[in-house]
């Protein structure tokens, strides 16, 4: 039995939350509910209380002024899990920017999301969901270890058809139960490289690529949620990494720096996932002063960078090693060749032939092992990361 705190914000999808609460109570979970003024336009406190749940609003008349003043802190400390369903676009924006103007947003700030994520089930019009402001707010929350339970597609109350419907009550129950399962990777140590390497040409210029680090961040969150201790060795990032007691962050801009840190930390680790986009080449002769624009052309001599995952696997053959293969053609064939030549345990084949693949929230991959090719996995990078760990978990747990 768990202590589950549920936030209900203003959306017609709140009726699904009533069904969700009923199922949680059947499973003997103890539930407390924060009902916002917007949420109260769709469901009543009396209806929620009839399910055996304690209900709190911005002003609970049965509490003293002192109890009311400390309520957001007491609720945050009480909860084993904190879930907001439905999450409206308005409340989403408040959470992303740290507003604390009602009991729900105050409880969010008082809850330590670095230890245990806050789970969000959005519900809104499909155009509101796709709005750039909404997507930017979601990205901010993901970086702070909030977990998004992606909305479904279909006919909406307004008559539109598209993504934005809150998932059904039975899915909410299933996802909640998954969060309560014992962490499958507790005690395991995992290195994840991510981001783009930077190879300097002179003090001003460098060679790099378009990698944002979003896939690496999704893998970090998935590993942390499973109880693993993660060392993130990162190059240039377009995102921020979360603060977490089980996460060590190491900045390594060049391929040589990344290799040095990977070797150092592989001594006592169980697994490495090489997700970083490492430049294949670096300049042979770094110019200590800015190169002047004197001629119509300039020639740079490039030499090969070290292959980080291959070198690490060669030095630590017992280390479970997973690579990424970003390819534009013959994706599976090229990835399978890399799996063999680098002696990896698995490789993630990623088709990057389409425009605007980098710095996107969605991706398409296949997981390849020696005698196994997974079906194509497509979707949000957080979902893809979860699928990657689900398929590789049996290998990790054998270590």
Image (tube, rainbow, N blue to C red):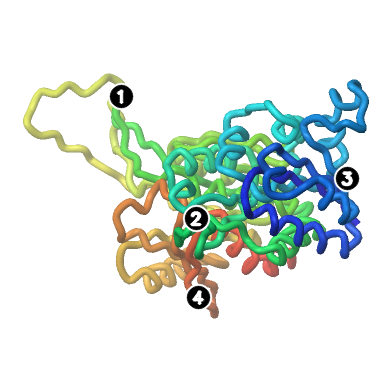
Say which quadrant the C terminus sits in: bottom right
Labels 2 and 4 touching (C-beta < 8 A): no
The quarter of the picture where residue 145 lies is top right
**Mark 1: few, some, or many residues within 10 Å (few <14, many ≥20)?**
few
Mark 2 — residue?
158
Upstream in the sequence, badge 3 or badge 4? 3
Query: Seen in the image, is 394 located left or right of residue 134?
Result: right
- The mark found on residue 54 in the picture is 3
Mark 3 to mark 4: distance in Å?
A: 45 Å
Mark 4 — residue?
375
Which element carries disc 2, helix, strand or loop?
A: loop
Upstream in the sequence, badge 1 or badge 3? 3
Seen at 55% across and 67% down, the residue is 346
Q: Nearer the viewer, mark 2 or mark 1?
A: 2
Residues 276 and 106: in front is 106
Seen at 33% across and 71% down, the residue is 330
Mark 1 — residue?
204
Mark 2 to mark 1: distance in Å?
A: 53 Å
Query: Seen in the image, is 188 located left or right of residue 364?
Result: right
Query: Seen in the image, is 200 located left or right of residue 58?
Result: left
Q: Position of residue 296 (x, y in %)?
A: 6, 31
Which element carries disc 4, helix, strand or loop?
A: loop
Seen at 73% across and 50% down, the residue is 43
**Mark 4: few, some, or many residues within 10 Å (few <14, many ≥20)?**
few
Q: Position of residue 149 (x, y in %)?
A: 62, 55
**Mark 2: few, some, or many residues within 10 Å (few <14, many ≥20)?**
few
Upstream in the sequence, badge 2 or badge 3? 3
Mark 2 to mark 3: distance in Å?
A: 31 Å
């Amino acid at each position: 039995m768990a202590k589950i705190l549920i936030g209900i914000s203003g959306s017609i999808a709140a009726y699904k939350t009533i069904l969700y609460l009923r199922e949680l109570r059947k499973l003997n979970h103890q539930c407390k509910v924060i009902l916002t003024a917007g949420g109260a336009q769709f469901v009543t406190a009396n209806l929620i209380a009839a399910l055996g749940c304690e209900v709190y609003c911005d002003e609970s008349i049965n509490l003293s002024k002192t109890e009311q003043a400390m309520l957001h802190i007491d609720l945050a400390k009480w909860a084993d899990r904190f879930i907001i369903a439905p999450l409206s676009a308005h409340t989403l924006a408040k959470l992303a920017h740290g507003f604390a103007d009602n009991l729900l947003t105050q409880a969010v700030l008082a809850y330590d999301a670095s230890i245990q994520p806050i789970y969000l089930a959005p519900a809104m019009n499909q155009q509101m969901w796709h709005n750039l402001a909404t997507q930017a707010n979601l990205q901010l929350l993901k970086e702070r270890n909030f977990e998004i339970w992606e909305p479904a597609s279909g006919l909406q109350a307004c008559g539109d058809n598209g993504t934005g419907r809150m998932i059904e009550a039975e899915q909410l129950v299933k996802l909640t139960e998954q969060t309560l399962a014992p962490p499958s990777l507790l005690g395991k140590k995992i290195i994840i490289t991510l981001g783009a390497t930077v190879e300097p040409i002179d003090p001003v210029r460098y060679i790099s690529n378009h990698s944002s680090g979003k896939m690496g961040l999704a893998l970090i969150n998935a590993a942390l949620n499973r109880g693993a201790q993660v060392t993130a060795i990162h190059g240039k990032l377009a995102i921020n990494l979360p603060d977490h007691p089980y996460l060590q962050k190491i900045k390594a801009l060049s391929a040589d720096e990344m290799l040095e840190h990977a070797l150092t930390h592989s001594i006592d680790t169980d697994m490495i996932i090489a997700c970083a986009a490492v430049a294949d080449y670096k300049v042979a002769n770094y110019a200590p002063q800015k190169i002047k624009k004197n001629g119509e052309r300039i020639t740079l001599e490039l030499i090969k960078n070290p292959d980080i995952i291959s070198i690490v696997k060669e030095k630590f053959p017992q280390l479970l090693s997973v690579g990424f293969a970003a390819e534009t053609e013959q994706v599976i064939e090229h990835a399978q060749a890399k799996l063999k030549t680098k002696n990896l345990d698995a490789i993630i084949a990623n088709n990057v032939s389409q425009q605007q693949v980098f710095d996107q929230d969605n991706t398409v991959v296949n997981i390849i092992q020696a005698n196994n090719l997974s079906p194509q996995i497509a979707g949000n990078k957080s979902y893809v990361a979860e699928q990657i760990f689900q398929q590789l978990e049996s290998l990790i747990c054998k270590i």
